[in-house]
Image: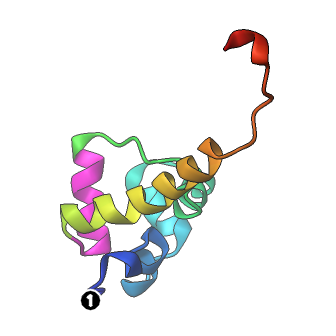
């Protein structure tokens, strides 16, 4: 099992149990593209309680592991996004 927080990713959890993106997508009622987007950290999953429970069962993980796997990349993406250079207009200061 993945022990360290930085080692937990949605991709690793899925691969660890031997599921394809398509298989996980079909189980959750989403598209394969959606799973890919989640795994790349482009978007955080928005799941119902039942989908979350099913995802935990399919990935054989705890809720904490699932949160870490889906939050880490999402947070990193937001940090990178927030550091983009914005135009400076001194009139607004």
Q: Nearer the viewer, residue 35 or 81?
A: 81
* Number of numbered tags placed on the structure image: 1
Q: With respect to residue 64, does 31 lie above or below?
A: above
Residue at the spot of label 1: 1
> Seen from this angle, which residue lies furthest top?
91
- In the rendered view, how is the structure colored? rainbow
Q: Position of residue 39 (x, y in %)?
A: 53, 64
Residue 46 seen in render: yes
Residue at 77% in and 18% down: 90
Q: Which span of residues is magenta-colored?
A: 50-61
Location of the N terminus by quadrant is bottom left
Is the residue 44 above or below the residue 18 in the image?
A: above
Residue 26 belongs to magenta span: no
Residue at 48% from the left image edge and 58% from the top image edge: 25
Q: Nearer the viewer, residue 68 or 66?
A: 68
Identify the residue shown where x is 43% and y is 69%: 10
> Is residue 57 one of those drawn in magenta?
yes
Check the image and report above or below for 30 versus 4.
above
Q: Position of residue 30 (x, y in %)?
A: 49, 48
Q: Would you say 40 lies left or right of 70 here?
A: right
Look at the numbered disc 1 and give the secondary structure of its residue. Answer: loop
Any part of residue 31 in sight: no
Q: Nearer the viewer, residue 18 or 75?
A: 75
Q: Residues within 10 Å of mark 1 (few under 14, many from 20)?
A: few
């Amino acid at each position: 099992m993945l022990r360290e927080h930085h080692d937990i990713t949605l991709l690793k959890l899925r691969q660890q149990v031997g599921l394809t993106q398509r298989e996980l997508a079909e189980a959750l009622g989403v598209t394969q593209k959606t799973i890919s987007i989640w795994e790349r950290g482009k978007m955080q999953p928005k799941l119902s309680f039942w989908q979350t429970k099913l995802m935990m069962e399919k990935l054989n993980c705890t809720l904490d592991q699932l949160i870490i796997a889906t939050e880490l990349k999402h947070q990193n993406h937001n940090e990178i996004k927030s550091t983009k250079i914005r135009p400076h207009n001194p009139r607004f200061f």
